[in-house]
Image (cartoon, rainbow, N blue to C red):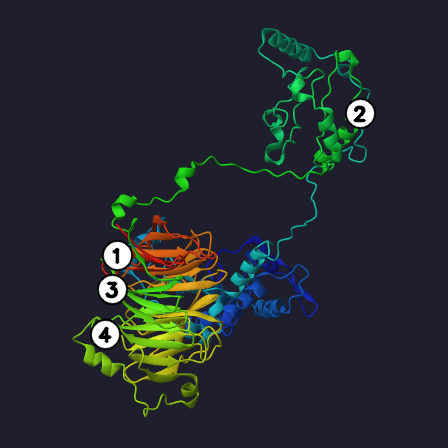
Amino acid sequence: MRKDGKKLKDDDLKPIEKEVVVNGSEVPSDSEDGSVESPVVSDDDESFSEGDDSSRNSDSESESGSEHSDFSEDEDGENPSNEGGLSDGVDDLNQGDQSASDDSREVVDESDSSEDEVGPRNTIGDVPLEWYKEEEHIGYDVAGKKIKKKERLDKLDSFLARTDDSNSWRKITDEIEDEEVELTKEETKLIRRLLKGQAPHADFDPHAPYIDWFAWDGAKHPLSNAPEPKRRFIPSKWESKKVVRYIRAIRKGLITFDKPKEEPRFYNLWGDESSSTEKAGHGLSYIPAPKPKLPGHEESYNPSLEYIPTQEEISAYQLMFEEDRPKFIPKRFTSLRSVPAYEKSVRESFDRCLDLYLCPRARKKRINIDPESLKPKLPSRKDLKPYPTTCYLEYKGHKGPVKSLSTDPSGQYIASGSLDGTVRIWEVETGRCIKIWELGEPVHHVAWNPLPELPILAVSMGQDVFILNTGIEKEEHKMIADLLHVETSTAQDDSESMASAVSWSQCERYEGIRIKHFKTVSSVEWHRKGDYFSTVMPAGESKAVLIHLLSKKLTQRLPFKLHGLPVSSTFHPTRSIFFVSTKKNVRVYDLVKKKFIKKLEAGVREISSISIHPGGDNVIVGSKDGKLCWFDMDLSSKPYKILKSHPKDITNVAFHRTYPLFASCSDDCTAYVFHGMVYSDLNQNPLIVPLEILHGHASANGRGVLDCKFHPRQPWLFTAGADSIIKLFCH
């Protein structure tokens, strides 16, 4: 019995059975009584010492090496460690000490006591370990007691343990027994050999010499000189019987043969080759060639008279280009026998071959889809009422194109500015003009103050911006007069550069304030609090957008660098956010934090107008190529929807303050009204539905509708046209 508990094999006993040569004399390994004795090992030998089990486990590698050296000596006996062990055994035999040999035999036969220290074995069998995943035990021992799970180290402790232990790579976890097993040196070698695809044992010879276990007398001459037997020349009767059985089976129809494929003698010359069975084996790789045009009545040898061209038509064919000239000119013959040979037959056959050879063909899969199913499921327009549909009033009085409109916060009055140099105040319900300012220069933009208690109007005209008192509120006349008073001694601005660019002065003629700019002002927009307003001058980048404070008569430029030529600007309806639209994009700034927030990429030719939803999270942008872009600022910097509605330039876009409506006007003399519902649920996209196309304006000098504004309280739309007429559309 070996130390590891395994029985000795015959190969392990071979070194012991050999004769040992010591000092030139042969000593038999058999004892006097004929029994095989084990070699005598001294008490100091570590491989068979009865010391502590811990030292035995720590020297497992040395033990395995000693076992290999003691019991696996090569046949030629060149192992030096084995010679030493056998020499000690020879000395003991020469001395005749039988007690020593008996003691050594007792040491060898002693069983290893390490098996008694092994913990209880798990007896769950083939039960999956996942069943015990949530339990505190991992299985049961032989006695039926639960085997508790061992505490597992966390990743950090296990990493530190592997770092300190040099033999950590030898350790594996036994999931069934829930213990850590350390592989021995022999086991690692065996695993490496298995991974390389070799035999597990190193002493295995895969190319051992062949052993011929059979021998015969005539091995040197395997061929025989005997004559051929007679049975090789006589037909076999068993084969003839088998042939007869096959013949009977064929006659009865039990055995059938595949019939050869017969090619059809006739086929459809103008048929579809894609459906033919001959091309079925090609699969999707086969694409049939297009069929040539079938001959019609013109190609007949005796066509009707209406197909035969006259001499004037034939002469006209000669004057045409060759590619435009008809390929075949019909002629009429009395009989088929008198038809001559076709002079273009060879040429057309050659062109047909070139078409088949050089023309690329591609397979296009067509899907039959109902076009109605591709349309979005939109609600009915009847369910989205009210919205403006018909023209209710017309405001006439301007002599030139009306460039801008603005409604007061109450919705009772409307202001208009025209290129004839006048600004008019109209009463909405009656259409009566109640006040006119003759400014003398074309008016580009008018804007009404959003505060009801401040009925003042901002008008941009050339390089000047006028702040005018409309005179509607008689009670607030004193407060408005104090607000529109400018003291000449007051400094215009804290910065010298801005004072030279903008100047505030009192305008006694119109009883208001005149703000002189260094460039032409294109638009004016008020802040929701009514004290700030912005002006845009489409020239330069650093001073193109200015913000004015009416109460202190101060002006400051936008503390940001604008990339591009500005077109318009507007304030956020609820937050301190400022929008500046250039010709290519819209830039969003935070005025309190003085930082840039985002850039909205419209992807259009040139932006013409901008409007902010009352909620503040959605923006619509009109362009000069007839596209309207809807931006969802919480979604992306790209447009959520692009509506291509107008064939000409969009002049202005507008949101309604309370109703889910927005509109756009264009130079095509129309205004489009849309339903734009913005939901409070962020997971639901805005609903955009086109509602109505409003007509009525006439074109003048290529211009149509120049501006549009919604009524602040009613679903009404005001439009200003180049025909000097203002129209009110109601529901």
Residue type, mark 1 in image: Tyr
Instruction: State the residue position of label 1.
Output: 659
Q: Is residue 555 above or below residue 431?
A: below
687 or 189, which lies in front?
687
Q: Nearer the viewer, mark 3 or mark 4?
A: 3
Q: Nearer the viewer, mark 3 or mark 2?
A: 3
Q: CA distance from mark 3 to mark 4?
A: 14 Å
Instruction: State the residue position of label 4.
Output: 454
Residue type, mark 3 in image: Tyr
Residue type, mark 4 in image: Leu
Q: CA distance from mark 4 to mark 2?
A: 93 Å
- Pointer 3 with pointer 2, Cβ within 8 A: no
Residue drawn at the location 52% of the way across and 56% of the way down = 8
The tag earlier along the polypeptide, 3 or 2, is 2
In the rendered image, residue 64, in percent from the top left (x then y), is placed at 53, 66
The tag earlier along the polypeptide, 4 or 2, is 2
Q: Secondary structure at mark 4?
A: loop
The tag earlier along the polypeptide, 1 or 4, is 4
Q: Residues within 10 Å of mark 2 (few under 14, many from 20)?
A: few
Instruction: State the residue position of label 2.
Output: 343
